[in-house]
Image (cartoon, rainbow, N blue to C red):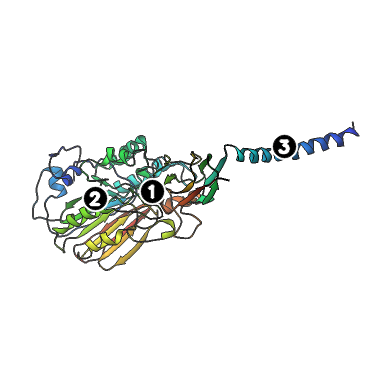
Amino acid sequence: MSLSSPSVRSVAFLLALSTPMAGILAGQALAAAPAKVSVAIKGFAFVPQVVTVAPGTTVTWTNADEDPHTVVADDKGFRSAALDSDDSYSFTFTKPGDYAYFCSLHPHMTGKIIVKAG
Amino acid sequence: MHDHHDHDLDESALSRRGLLTRCAGWAGTAALYTMAGGVTSSISLDAALAARPIMGKTKPFTFLQISDTHLGFDKPANPNTRATALEAVAKIKALPQKPDLILHTGDITHLSKDEQFDDAKAILSDLGTPIFYVPGEHDFLDEGGGKAFLAHYGKGTLGTGWYSFDHNGVHFVALNNVANLKPGGMAHIGDDQLAWLKKDLAGLSSSTPIVVFAHIPLWTVYEEWGWGTDDSAQALGFLRRFGSVTVLNGHIHQILQKVDGNISFHSARSTAYPQPAPGAAPSPGPLKVPTEQLPSMLGIRSATFTRGNAPIALIDSSLA
């Protein structure tokens, strides 16, 4: 037992290493198909403020603040309900273009989703 | 003493009259105004409430401002905003002079939920004093974009909830600057409300003392945090000819003042939680302070108001 222990440990170590890598690879594979992107609402800001995605990407905003926020397109093309702490809102962008948005409660908070192919 | 219940005044009458009947609650900052003299205008609060016209007659009076009760907020900055609102009510009830009326400068609720509006009424109606409300952005975030607030407080108001009324010669103007906000901007009054304001003030003598109340400051406190109103210059333009204009707001949960000619601006404390001084933190979110320190950062405000150009004596009382 004392001899086999090190090898068992190293196998476990390799598994521990390979599992997150597999996760990352899966994430990249997903990006080519219907993709998902997250935007945090944190410190009265959209983070990242500008995101470029491929058509068909679903963007999910999650509010990490203690204050409620909203996600509202400048042209009203999409609009979330008020998001309390930890609430999320998702929207799938199918057509290429620039989508400026803001928080309708704190309008100095602005962001942009750029949708373009390839 | 006003025995104010649900006096049902002639609802078909002026909107400012109707609004006088919807004073069942209030919230966060307190301002007491003693008014000696004054020009009586069309309808006094006394007349409207008690059907007891006292045309041409004035008397000293006090009023109070409370703000930002944020009922429903339960985060670490104050897990029990209901308890602190009740403390504010107790503080107001203990005042030596009962205010004629109370102004609530918004963020009555945290999330515009009906049960939060109802709770505000339950807590504030205990004061037995007419309460006049303006909404904060937290009162206007329902799916209907303010329908919930207007269902509770909109009776007799115009547009998104603005109105005016007179009491003992003082003209009170309630503005909503949290509706239809524009991307990249700050608070906003909007053209319809500005047109109404201009008309509302047009018939008044320049000696009429004016009190304007709105949620977000009408002067730019800190643009990076949206602490200002992007079209306030037009509103202030209509107000400059008056000898005494007092502008009361909430929103920033701290006491700040500014004087600009005959116009003085005063932001009030919250009864719920403090916020950082302008630029003193990465964001304007709720400020967590040691529990024992919290009451000293919450409060109500009373003020003594004398007619004409005399300065206003404000008394801010913390809940400590």
- What mark, if any, has residue B99 been given in the picture? 2
Circles 1 and 3: CB atoms closer than 8 Å:
no
Determine if marks 1 and 2 fall on one subunit.
yes
Q: Position of residue B19 (x, y in %)?
A: 20, 44
Q: Amino acid at mark 1?
A: Thr
Choose the circle earlier in sequence order: 1 or 2.
2
Crowdedness of circle 2 by 10 Å Cα count: few (<14), some, many (20+)?
many
Crowdedness of circle 3 by 10 Å Cα count: few (<14), some, many (20+)?
few
Q: What residue is pinned by disc 3?
A: A19
| Secondary element type, mark 2 | loop
| Secondary element type, mark 1 | loop
| Residue B293 visible in the shown view | yes
From this viewpoint, which residue is outermost toward the top? A1
Q: Label 1 marks which chain's residue?
A: B
Tell me: residue B220, above or below residue A89. below
Q: Amino acid at mark 3?
A: Thr
Q: What residue is pinned by disc 1?
A: B271
Q: Alpha-carbon distance for marks 1 and 3? A: 50 Å
